[in-house]
Image (cartoon, rainbow, N blue to C red):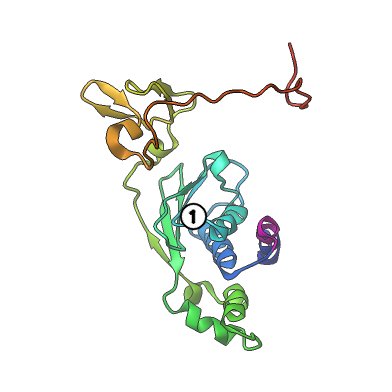
Amino acid sequence: MIALEEFLKRSAALHSHICPRQVLGVRMGLLAAKLLGLELPQHDKRTLAIVESDGCFADGVAVATNCWVGRRTLRVEDFGKTAATFVDTKTGLAWRIAPHPGGRERASVYAPEARNRWEAMLLGYQRMPDVELLVAQRVTLRTPVAAIISRAGYRVACDRCGEEIINEREVRIGTALLCRSCAGQSYYCVASQGETPVEAAEQPEATSPFLHST
């Protein structure tokens, strides 16, 4: 198993620094491997991580588990909490892991050389035993894993706006299939009436190695 220090280096490389929340994310990923009985960081997509806040904590979880948003193995449900749920997508077994309520205060015991509270957390979180740092609970997802993962290649068009919807995220209202925005679940509102087309500026011939003519 990769050592804690190596995971912290990987996480720090994403932020140019290391902080206590990154340590918590990594420690949660390491504990999840024990609880699920799986090898993490994973080399496939068996483990799904659901983090309850974004930022550096989420990257700590990601490097320890190899769960990433771009691979559809990490999801953000923003509850503003430094907590995460780890799911074995083959068995449905799920564990939610959160910081121990007394962990912040106990950290200084494990870092007597710390010069301040922040440094005590940074060092203490690396040294504390799991039982003093974290709390784990067996949980059941309200949305089945199969529905979260969905089916590859599935897509429909919204009956109202016409935009494409993937991953079975459409909402059925009567006989209409709508995107969540048209169904009244939008996180935005249009700033002005009508649409403004994006006008493509004249560009020189593409030279990207990823673009070529056929």
Q: Amino acid at mark 1?
A: Leu
**Between 91 and 203, the one nearer to me in the picture:** 203
The residue that appears at 44% across and 56% down in the rendered structure is 52
Identify whether 125 is placed above or below 141.
Answer: below
Q: Give the left or right position of residue 140, taking residue 58 as reference.
A: left
Residue 174, image quadrant: top left
Find residue 197 and report its horizontal and vertical position in percent: 50, 23
- According to the image, label 1 marks what residue? 36
The residue that appears at 69% across and 21% down in the rendered structure is 202
Find residue 180 and report its horizontal and vertical position in percent: 34, 34
Part of the protein shown in magenta: 10-16
Find residue 105 and report its horizontal and vertical position in percent: 48, 83
Q: Give the left or right position of residue 166, taking residue 19 as reference.
A: left
Identify whether 123 is placed above or below 112.
Answer: above
Identify whether 167 is placed above or below 125.
Answer: above
Q: Is residue 180 visible?
A: no
The residue that appears at 35% across and 39% down in the rendered structure is 186
> Mark 1 falls on what kind of element?
helix
Find residue 26 and report its horizontal and vertical position in percent: 58, 62
